[in-house]
Image (cartoon, rainbow, N blue to C red):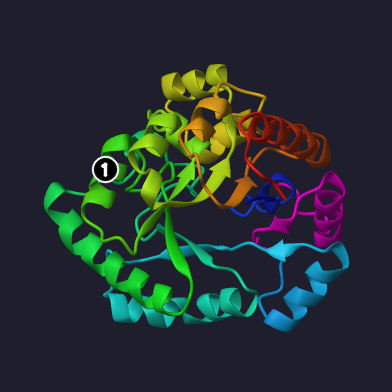
Amino acid sequence: MIRIGANPIGWSNDDLLELGGETPLETCLAEAAEIGFSGMELGNKFPREAGALKAALAPFNLACISGWYSAELLERDAKSEMTALRPHLDLLKAMGSNVLVFAETSNAIHSNRAVPLSRRPVLAAGAWKTFGARMTEVAKMTLDEGVRLVYHHHMGTIVQSGADIAALMDNTGDAVHLLLDTGHATWGGTDPAALARTYRNRISHVHTKDVRDAVMREAARGDWSFLESVLAGVYTVPGDGMVDFTAVFRELAGYSGWVVIEAEQDPAKANPKAYATKGYRHLVEVLSALGFPCA
């Protein structure tokens, strides 16, 4: 069974707080529920105490899917990472979430509007083994507690390109799974359908966003930062850009889990409810045509 969820970043941005900063959490939740989403990932406006979070979600009958965690495994060992992770992990467990969205951010530039993507960090070939071993150790510990670590490849980080993803997967054990993000894959120069085919057995979470080809090319020519590109509209919802979602999900036959629309845009230019509705309808159409049972 596939459950279709949303990330609140279309309503309120986590890296540029002024984007959607005035939008109440209740508006995001009410509109998501009205559209038909079954759950929401966490964002900066969500309570981080289980009782308060349950109270916020319950009126809208929305599940807590997961939430982003900023890791620093390049700078600390697995035990120290687990200490830092503990409050977030305990919240996810209390909410019944079974995946942990995990990304290395100790040297990332995606949240710095002034730094172009050409200056994103690149991990030396000899450093992947230690990094992967630490991540595998963390992933085994979270899995022992019922939560699967899913790694979020992301523009402006050490895991951006297809080669980066391959190095990550080659240097981690089976406890580490991949969060397939169609937008970051496409912008990072990798066909998301090919990623789905290659890592099908280790994909346990999917983020669906589309890419506007013209903006992506302009961003490359101008050497823009990640956030400048987002403000210009590089990302959009499924069905509004260049990604072939039918091809992606054809490679994910038998997938069971969450499929999340996560398309950061400027809400002043792209009405969150209208765009989320467009993306939701496109996903339902694609998944239904391929025979995926959805909830």
Total tally of numbered discs in the picture:
1
Residue bounds of the magenta highlight: 19-45
Residue projecting furthest to the left? 126
Where does label 1 land, which residue? 166
* Residue 214, picture quadrant: top right
* Residue 39, picture quadrant: bottom right
Q: Residues within 10 Å of mark 1 (few under 14, many from 20)?
A: some
Which residue is depicted at the point 76% across and 32% down? 278
Q: Position of residue 142 (x, y in %)?
A: 42, 75
* Residue 215, picture quadrant: top right
User: Is residue 58 left or right of 250 when viewed as pictured?
Assistant: right
Which residue is depicted at the point 53% across and 34% down? 249
Q: Position of residue 264 (x, y in %)?
A: 64, 41
Which residue is depicted at the point 44% across and 58% down? 150
Whether the magenta-drawn stretch holds residue 160 is answered as: no
Q: Nearer the viewer, residue 110 or 133?
A: 133
Q: Position of residue 212 (x, y in %)?
A: 58, 23
Which residue type carries mark 1? Answer: Ala
Whether the magenta-drawn stretch holds residue 41 is answered as: yes
Residue 272 higher or lower than 258, as above or below: above
- Would residue 270 be visible to someone looking at this image? no
User: Is residue 161 left or right of 7 when viewed as pictured?
Assistant: left
Q: Position of residue 221 (x, y in %)?
A: 43, 19
